[in-house]
Image (cartoon, coloured by chain):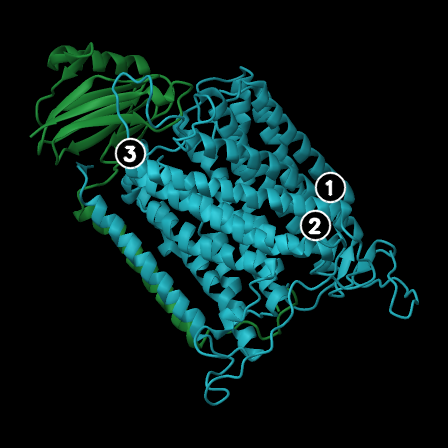
Amino acid sequence: MSIHAPAADWFRAPHGEEKVWVGLAILWCIVMTIAMPYWYLFGKQNSAGESYRVTPQEFRDRVDRFVETNRVSDIQGVPVVQPAPGGDAYLRAQMWTWYPILKFKKGQTYRLHISSVDLQHGFSLLPLNMNFQVLPGYDHVLTLTPTSSGEFSIVCNEFCGIGHHMMTGRIIVEG
Amino acid sequence: MSSTTMDGAVPAPRVTGNHVAGRVRACDTTGLPVCLVAQKFIWLHAVAAVVFLLVGGIGALLLGLTRWPAVHLLDPQWFYRILTLHGLNMLIFWIINFEIAILYFAGTVLLNSRLYSKALAWTGFGLMTVGSLMVNYAIFEGRSDVLMTSYLPLMATPVFYLGIILFAVGALVAVGNFFGTIYIAKRDRTYEGSVPLVVFGAIAAAIIAVVALLHGAIAMVPTFLQSIGVISNLDPAWYRLTWWGLGHMSQQINVCAMVSVWYFLATLTTGAKPLNQAVCRGAFVLYILFINVASAHHLLVDPGVSAAWKIWNTSYAMYLAVLASMIHGFTVPAAVEQAMRAKGHDRGLFGWLTAAPWGNPGFSGFMLSLVIFGFGGGITGVTLGTQQINIMAHNTLRIPGHFHMTVVGGTTLAFMAVTYYVVPLLFRREFYARGLCRLQPWLFGIGITLVGIGMSFAGSYGVPRRHWDIEFSGAQFATGFDSGAHVMLGLMGIGVLLAFTGLLLYILLTVAAVFFGRRIEGRAMEPWHVERTPVAPRGEPGVVSPARVPGALALGIVFLACFAVFYFANWLWLSDVWHVR
């Protein structure tokens, strides 16, 4: 009984179906243990967590320089910025905007720097459903290769105050 | 304190173990000795738990009716305020109060011991109550809309943090009182040999609770100091790592307590005995040893921590904590199968299962808890906690979809189920409306399953958690979700209505029984079910030896197949999104 003291010889190996089940469960755990390092080595989607310390003011300046240098147009008053393929792109999270609008080329790789200048935010790319955490003080670098083209939305999925639901942005990918 | 026997004679109070005369009674149903001091504090913590469950439950209803886009009830300010309220009252105040009640029960009744200290029990209960009231005051006062996690640099009022600290200290004192009880039981030799399995599970829960609550202190004390202006500029990444040491590890307390309740109810409702105590106890040890850096599960797509750190900490030592849950999820039904077969319900692979007492809320509640925890919460949890797959899940509704199936469908439902025995056995009151009691676990279980499914699928479209408006009204760049996501949120809404009805029913039935129920002192509790007469087995009797559990193994294989399909489907899906490193 599980509510009474067990028999004195309770310490023994499992047998029968229980032994089979413990074996199967261990096997499955081994499969899952191998899957992550395997995907890290051979898979194309990983969160390496590459990041650097940055103050909100420094990051603000970097975003502004990036916008000045690479601006190609405006949409609703927000600059559309197209970085060189292989180059750095910057995205600033701030209550309650993503700035600026980024323009990428499909199949090209970019180093996308994301940071916040106030609270924590959540970078959520829709409709792909790719999500990364954004913290103030941390320049989070995603080495990103768009594999599909079109207009994508960025929404915020970390609570950042009363206007949280209004925090949207855009990434445009040319084919 | 004395009980009357059939012929009206009053027997002398039984004093065994280390009990004090006059502060112990024998249970009229099981004969187990009940320390009356412990009984009082079990009552206090259980009643407090149910009060916070009601507060959190009303919050759940309001939140569900807001996230159901067709209803969209609250305004944004009240939505986030109620979300803060719901999280803290449910995940902390309801569940930890109930767990302290379980610890006091397991440490005293099952070990034939008295409670270590009445003063410590009062201190613990007092601090926990004051702390939880302070937090609720801070929330309603309106300057602490920071959600349960209160991620820095968001700042709540000092009262909010101080309330959490006092509650955590109170819980630590109560856990200390439990360890004190274990110590005097051992010292006074109140039991023979090893502690019973349920006590073993409770000890595992208590050990994890100490580690979790210490993390809470490390996260909350500096944050409190920042809120009163003593220090400044605490690091948000440090906070996330430390806070989740409390946040995630306290879920392991819930798992340990829930599994202990499964074993307890399996024994009470079917007479089940664990097949192999070494396997069950070993699995509890795995929880203690291999869950400690579980906060990594919340940082899988964070900056500041490397891929190697993330991969190691989400799977270290080969997912041995997951293995532990897979073992318990098998050994509990296997023990029931063995007990049912031994009673003669030996027909076919699942004859034991169909003959099981599904009308007994203690049985149906814990079995539904086991199924929802395993098939719903377990499979989704391990998959979403896979480092790379988390890219498609972090901060979406898939996360609350998962944990509503572990901590609500699993732990809360198990605690509801055990209430159907706690009230008659410990508080010696009968339930009214026994038909409604039988219905309640089903209503709550089905409701919360729909909540979990609706949230999980909506989250698969990318619908964020903790978000007031998925129409993004007022946003500069319009966006929105596929109609499929709206259908799933509707399903969640219906689930919320069912689960809330089940929760309200639970509270009404329990309150009616605890305060106004018919007293049953001096006689056994009314049984929840009558043993069925076994149908004669097909073919020759004893074709399946009662010592074997092929049915449980078959269920386990079905579970593994579901797990594998869901797991690999997610990898396939991941391979389709943009490349990222």
Q: Residue at x 92, y 64 (%)?
A: B10
Q: Chain of mark 3?
A: A
What percent of the width, then of the height, locates residue B48?
67, 39
**Residues at marks 3 and 2 touching, judged by CB atoms closer than 8 Å:** no
Q: On the same chain: label 1 and label 3?
A: no
Residue B467 sits in quarter = top left
**Residues at marks 1 and 2 touching, judged by CB atoms closer than 8 Å:** yes
Residue reaching furthest bottom?
B540
Q: Residue at x 56, y 46 (%)?
A: B502
Q: Nearer the viewer, residue A165 or A110?
A: A165
Q: Which residue is mark 1?
A: B120
Q: Nearer the viewer, residue B351 or B256?
A: B351
Q: Which residue is mark 3?
A: A131
What label does residue B180 carry, if any?
A: 2
- The cyan-tinted chain is B
What percent of the width, then of the height, locates residue B356?
55, 68
Amino acid type at circle 1 is: Leu
- The green-tinted chain is A
How busy is the neighbourhood of tag 1: few (under 14 within 10 Å), some, or many (20 plus)?
Answer: some
Amino acid type at circle 2 is: Gly
Q: Residue at x 43, y 56 (%)?
A: B374
Q: Secondary structure at mark 1?
A: helix
A157 over B326 or under it: above or below: above
B287 over B158 or under it: above or below: below
Measured Cα–Cα span from mark 3 to mark 2: 46 Å
What label does residue B486 carry, if any?
A: none
